[in-house]
Amino acid sequence: MDTSLPKKGQLESEISKSITQWEKEYLGRGPIQVKTDIVRNMIIVHLKGILTPAERELTKTETGMLSIKKIRADLVETGNEQLKEIIYQSTGEPVESFYTDISTRNAERIIVFMLKENLEKKLVE
């Protein structure tokens, strides 16, 4: 067994911490909870508690909800190169593509990073 390979759980935790730090520095506020899962060539990050109290108020109307979704999507999109760099620094794998969506109802965001290689195969359980 190659002990130089990181353990899957450790790497998932490291990515969660790095994404939380990015959220705090770039968006000005971090999520309440972050969970990262590495599945084949995907890194799936689930962030909970991402909306500010003012944003939660705005989501009570459809117009406000759509506005928050658009603004938050635009903000993450402008920082996507930084996010891809976080993944590369953590895993050594380049990000091929990046997807994100937000649920204003549940104050959650999902980010999916698609890698070229199957990262899960390379990791120790």
Image (cartoon, helix red, strand yellow):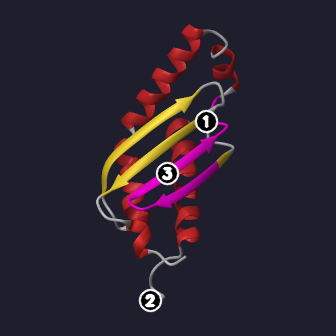
> Which residue has dot 1 on it?
108
Q: Amino acid at mark 3?
A: Ile
Q: Secondary structure at mark 3?
A: strand
Q: CA distance from mark 2 to mark 3?
A: 25 Å
In the picture, the disc for residue 39 is none
Q: Foreground residue, 53 or 33? A: 33
Q: Position of residue 2 (x, y in %)?
A: 44, 89
Pointer 2 local density, CA inside 10 Å: few below 14, some 14–19, many at least 20: few
Are circles 2 and 1 on residues that touch, CB within 8 Å?
no
Residue at position x 45%, y 55% in the image: 43
Q: What range is drawn magenta here?
A: 34-51
> Which residue has dot 3 on it?
44
Q: CA distance from mark 3 to mark 1?
A: 13 Å
Location of the C terminus (image quadrant): bottom right
Q: Amino acid at mark 1?
A: Glu
Q: Amino acid at mark 2?
A: Asp
Pointer 1 local density, CA inside 10 Å: few below 14, some 14–19, many at least 20: some
Q: Secondary structure at mark 2?
A: loop
Q: In the figure, 36 relative to 56: above or below?
A: below
Mark earlier in primary sequence (2, 1): 2
Q: Position of residue 112 (x, y in %)?
A: 44, 47
Residue at position x 38%, y 35% in the image: 77
Q: Position of residue 94 (x, y in %)?
A: 30, 59
Q: Position of residue 10 (x, y in %)?
A: 57, 70
Q: In which quadrant of the rendered view does residue 73 lie?
A: top left
Q: Secondary structure at mark 1?
A: strand
Q: Foreground residue, 51 or 97? A: 97
> Which residue has dot 2 on it?
2
Mark earlier in primary sequence (3, 1): 3
Q: Foreground residue, 55 or 24? A: 55
